Image (spheres, rainbow, N blue to C red):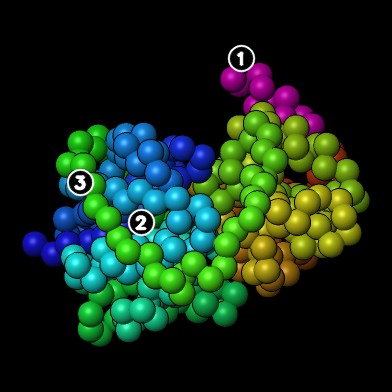
Amino acid sequence: MSTVLILADFVGEKATKSTVELATAGAGIGEVTALVLAPAGKGAALAATITQGAIAKVIVIESDDFIQHGVAASADALAHVTDQLKPAALLIASHAFGKEVAGRVAMKLVCGIITDAVDVAPDCTATQLVFGGSTTVHSKVPQGTAIITVRPNTITADFVAANPVIENATAQISDVAKKATVTSTQPPVKGGRPELTEANIVVSGGRGTNGDFGAVEAFADSLGAAVGASRAATDAGWYPHSHQVGQTGKTVSPQLYVACGISGAIQHRAGMQTSKNIVVINKDPEAPLFELADFGVVGDLFAVLPPATEGVKAHKA
C-alpha cells in the first residue's frame, strides 16, 4: 500500500479540522502518516490532539528551530522526512505558511507541486479552480512525490476516531535555514467567532452595509458563523483586511455562505464560489452574485437580516 504524508496543522496547541481533511484525502490514496513539527518539549502534547482522521502513524520532530527560524527550518525537517518515506503524496493545508513550506520542499526534493487543490483523487490527480474559479483543472505530478496543498473546507472530513502509533524522530536543520531569525511574533486577536477559513458558516458584508456591520455580525452570531467582508468594505476601512474574502483575501468553502450587500465582482467570487450553499441578499436584482445563488433575497440587508436573526434565535429556543 502507498504511503501518504500529511503535515499536521495546528492552531495554538490543538490540531485543526484541516488535519482531518488532509487525512481524509490521503486515506483515499494510501496509509496516512502525519508529521508534527513542534517546539522542544511540546511534541507529545500536540500529537495527543490528533484524535480524529484515518491516520496510522504520527511522526514527531521537536526543535526550537521551528520557532526561531520559521518556515525555512520547517521545510528542512519536512523535506528530510519526505525523502526518507518517499510517499506517493505529501499533503499540506493551503494557507500562507503551508504554501511557502510546500514550495521550499518541492525545490529541495525536485518534486512537482500543485497548490490550492479542492480535491485529490486516489491516483493523486488534483482538482483546482483557476482564473477566478471560472475553469476547473485536473493536474497530476508525473513522477516522484506529488506535493499538493489542499484548500481548507473543500474536503468532507471523515472524523473517524484515530489511534495512531507515535514515533519520535530527528532532522538536521541546515545553516542556510538559520540565516533568518524570527525576533518576535504576535498572534492575531481573535474573538468568539470561528476562524474564517475553517468555519462551516460564513456571513459576509459588502458595500451595501455602508460601513455598518452590526446587522451582519448579529446574524452571524445567531448562526455561530464567521464574519467576512468584500474588498470594497475592507478598502473603505469598514472591516479589518484579515476578514477579506476574495482573490486577494482569503478563500473560504463553508457549508453555507451568506453574502449581504455584495454585488459579486469576479474578485470576490473567486474566494467563495466553492461554498456548498450560497445565499445572496442584495437590493439590486441585477447583482452578478445572484448567478451563483442557491437562494436569493432581493431586498435591503437592514430590512432582511434583523427578522432573520430573530427567526434563528426563536428556532433555537
Q: Which residue is mark 2?
A: 7
Q: Confirm whether residue 150 shows in the render.
A: no
Q: x, y (%) of residue 59?
A: 25, 50
| Vertical comparison of 197 with 121: above or below | above
Distance between the alpha carbons at the discs numbered 1 and 3: 47 Å
Estimate the x, y position of residue 102 in percent, counting from the top left.
42, 70
Cα distance, mark 3 to mark 2?
A: 15 Å
Q: Amino acid at mark 3?
A: Glu
- Left or right, 304 with respect to 108, comes to right
Q: Which residue is mark 3?
A: 167
Name the image quarter holding residue 163: top left
Magenta segment includes 159: no
User: Answer yes or no: do the residues labelled 2 and 1 have beta carbons within 8 Å?
Assistant: no
Residue drawn where x is 49% and y is 67% of the image: 178
Camera-near label (3 vs 2) is 3
Query: In the figure, 3 relative to 243: above or below?
Result: below
Q: Earlier in the sequence, mark 3 or mark 2?
A: 2
Q: Is residue 309 magenta?
A: yes
Camera sees residue 166 = yes
Of pointers 1 and 3, the one earlier in the residue sequence: 3
Say which of 44 and 68 sits in front.
68
Measuring 23% from the left and 38% from the top, which residue is drawn there? 162
Q: Residues within 10 Å of mark 2 (few under 14, many from 20)?
A: many
Q: Which residues are magenta?
A: 305-317
